[in-house]
Image (cartoon, rainbow, N blue to C red):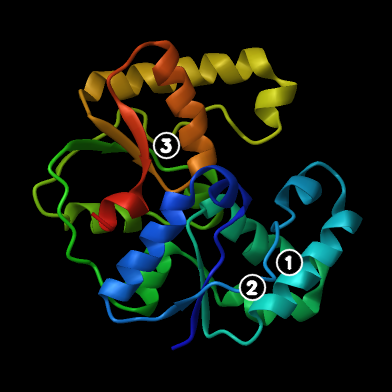
Amino acid sequence: MRIALFVTCVNDAFYPATGIAVTRVLRRLGHDVDFPAGQTCCGQMHANTGYAAQAVPIAEQFARTFGDYDAIVAPSGSCVAMIREQYPRLIPSAAPVAARTYELSELLLDVLGVEDVGARFAHRVTYHPTCHGLRALRLGDRPLRLLRAVRDIDLVELPGAEECCGFGGTFAVKNPEVSAAILADKCIAVATTGADVVAAADNSCLAHIGGGLSRRRSGTRPLHYAEILAS
C-alpha cells in the first residue's frame, strides 16, 4: 500500500513533531510513508469563511499531489473533514482521492486493522475529542481505543469531553469573549482529571487549550495523541 502523509499547515509550521510521530508509528508497523513536496494548505480557512472559489485551486492541487496514493493520512480531524466533506462539492473529480484520505485513527483501525501500535507512555492522560473529528468524521472511540492499548498509560475520562474547546478557527478571533468562556470551562474540566497530558487529534484545538492552561499555570501539557502512540 502506498501511503502519503498530509501534514497540514498548522503541524508543518508549529508542530512538526506530530508529522514525524505519524511517520514513526507507520514505519514501526512496517509501512513506508511518502511526503509529497507539492502539498499545500487544505483550503479549509478559505471555504469556511465564504471564499469557496479561492479554495477550488487548493483542492485541485491536493488532488494532483495525492492522486496516485492508496491512502493519505493526516494528523488533523478538521483538515480531513474539509477534504472528505467539501472537496467533492468543490470539484467532483476530487471525490476519489478525498475518499482515500484518513485521520490517523481511521487509517490504523479501519484500513490497517491495528489497535496496539507498540507504544509505551507512563503518564496520566485525558483525551479531548475535537469537534470535527467527533461530529464530521464521527471518529467515535477510535483514538481512545489506540490510547487504551498504550502500555503504562493512565488514561482518565475528561468531564464534558464532547463539549467544544472554544477555538473553531476564526470563531475564536471573531467571538473572543464567547471563545474564552468556552475555553475556561474546558480548562476547568481538564484540571479536575489531574492529568499530566491532555491529548487530542487536532493541534489547533490543543494550542487553544494549551494557551488557557498555561495562563492558569496548570501543570497539564497539550500533546497530539500521535506523539503518544510514537513513544
Mark 3: few, some, or many residues within 10 Å (few <14, many ≥20)?
A: few
The residue shown at (81%, 41%) is 49
Q: Mark 3 is on which residue type? A: Glu
Residue 38: horizontal and vertical position, in percent?
Answer: 70, 71
Q: Which mark is residue 98?
A: 2
Apparent side of residue 216 relative to residue 28 in the rendered image (left or right): right
Check disc 3 and report its element: helix, strand or loop.
Answer: loop
The 10 Å Cα crowd at callout 2, few under 14, some 14 to 19, many 20 or more, is many
Amino acid residing under circle 2: Ala
Cβ atoms at labels 3 and 1 below 8 Å apart:
no
The residue that disc 3 covers is: 162
Write the residue at 82% across / 57% down.
55
Q: Pointer 1: what residue? A: 87
Q: Amino acid at mark 1?
A: Tyr
**Above-or-below relation of 170 to 23:** above
- Counting residues from the start of the chain, the first of labels 3 and 1 encountered is 1
Element carrying mark 1: helix
Residue 108 point in image, percent of width and height: 34, 70
Determine if residue 164 is in view.
Answer: no
Instruction: Answer left or right for 82 relative to 24.
Output: right
- Can residue 47 be seen by looking at this rendering? yes
Quadrant occupied by the N terminus: bottom left
State the residue at coordinates (41%, 71%).
Answer: 107
Marks 2 and 1, how far apart at CA: 7 Å
Q: Position of residue 101 (x, y in %)?
A: 56, 71
> Mark number for residue 40?
none
Give the Cα separation between the discs numbered 3 and 2.
26 Å
Residue located 24% across and 35% down the image: 157
